[in-house]
Amino acid sequence: MRIGVLTGGGDCPGLNAVIRAVTKSLIGQCGAEVIGIQDGFEGLLGDTPQTLPLDWQRVSGILQTGGTVLGTTNRSNPLRDEAATRQCLANANALGLDALVVIGGDGTQSIAHGLADRGLPCVGVPKTIDNDIAQCERSFGFDTAVATAAEALARIETTAMSHRRVMIVETMGRHAGWIALEAGLAAAADVILLPEIDYDIEAVAAVCRAREQRQRYTVICIGEGAKPRGGELTVQGLVPSSHDPVRLGGVALVLREQLQMRLSSEVRATVLGHVQRGGMPTAFDRVLATRFGHRAAQLVRAGEFNRMVTLQGGELGSVPLADVAQRQRTVPADHPLLVTAREIGVSLGI
Ligand code: F6P
């Protein structure tokens, strides 16, 4: 067997752990040859495929490292036109691939689904710090992003306290508030604003005013996809060649302006950005990524293609790629963590 492996979309802590587990399982359990495809689907779109042979030695020592040894991009889509799709399939064929393990988020899994429909056997592995992939309750990388954001919030709190300021911290997560919610709870944020709940600026200002009297400072954690009631998303820019071209970012600065005109305290904003995606994965993510990679290799060996590895109810499983493509898992209105937040006095901005 000759199996290709690629990482697509934004990078994420734990990618190397998956690459390692896929490679070691396939070599160890069935003597397969494993070929890394470089820079996501980009590596299958040129005249010659760009590859990196993966053997036992190449994947040793990468478990704890951030980023991806294969490189990645969220700018290249082989389904963008028929010529690109054909080029991609021809390159996979020229490499003699029996299957392709595709490690990526919802956009990348949609591409895998499209290629699978065109005859390339694919197995998906869900990846994203945003934790927003349909049918998967926990993706690797999320725990690391939450830990990084929570640490940043805790650091911001001591400076908020010292200066009696209102400090706003913006997390990533696109249209899902999982990072903001868990990091906010982990770091005792006073206000947590999520994309799923449009905030009322007067309600947020009222919390800060009340705290000006008593605690004298306020820490607000806001997800990048949050917006004020009746307002718009804050878009940082567009990447036209990307599967999902809209890049969010900067809502913390919008909120800062809105609050500053309503409060006597000084209001400051910090956008955490890509620091949440970089660096060493937590032990939890290293284990989850290893389990995902191993399960992907099992699916390949069993010939169960066009499926994505999942985690549901704490158990590993798999679902058809068709059930994942073009869907996102956001925070439901009745999620237990929202109830916990409300009942311990955290404001959700409404
Ligand atoms: O999907 C992961 C993510 O980090 C999002 O949270 C964020 O909105 C986006 O990627 C940023 O993408 P880029 O690296 O292209 O700026």
Image: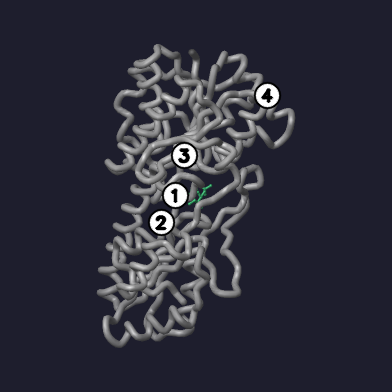
Q: Secondary structure at mark 3?
A: strand
- Residue drawn at x 49%, y 19% is 3
Determine whether 219 is above or below 119 in the image.
below
Q: Is residue 309 visible?
A: yes
Q: Given contact means CB atoms under 8 Å apart, are the residues at marks 1 and 2 in contact? A: yes
Amino acid at pointer 1: Asn
Determine whether 54 is above or below 187 in the image.
above
Q: Given contact means CB atoms under 8 Å apart, are the residues at marks 1 and 3 in contact? A: no
First along the sequence among labels 1 and 4: 4
Q: Residues within 10 Å of mark 3 (few under 14, many from 20)?
A: many
Q: Is residue 167 visible?
A: no
Q: Given contact means CB atoms under 8 Å apart, are the residues at marks 4 and 2 in contact? A: no
Q: Is mark 2 within 8 Å of ligand 1?
A: yes
Q: Which residue is mark 2?
A: 179
Name the mark on residue 97: none
Point out residue 98 in the picture as x, y percentages from the top left corner: 54, 17
Name the mark on residue 126: 3
Mark nearest the camera among 2 and 3 is 3
Q: Which residue is mark 1?
A: 131
Q: Which residue is mark 4?
A: 87
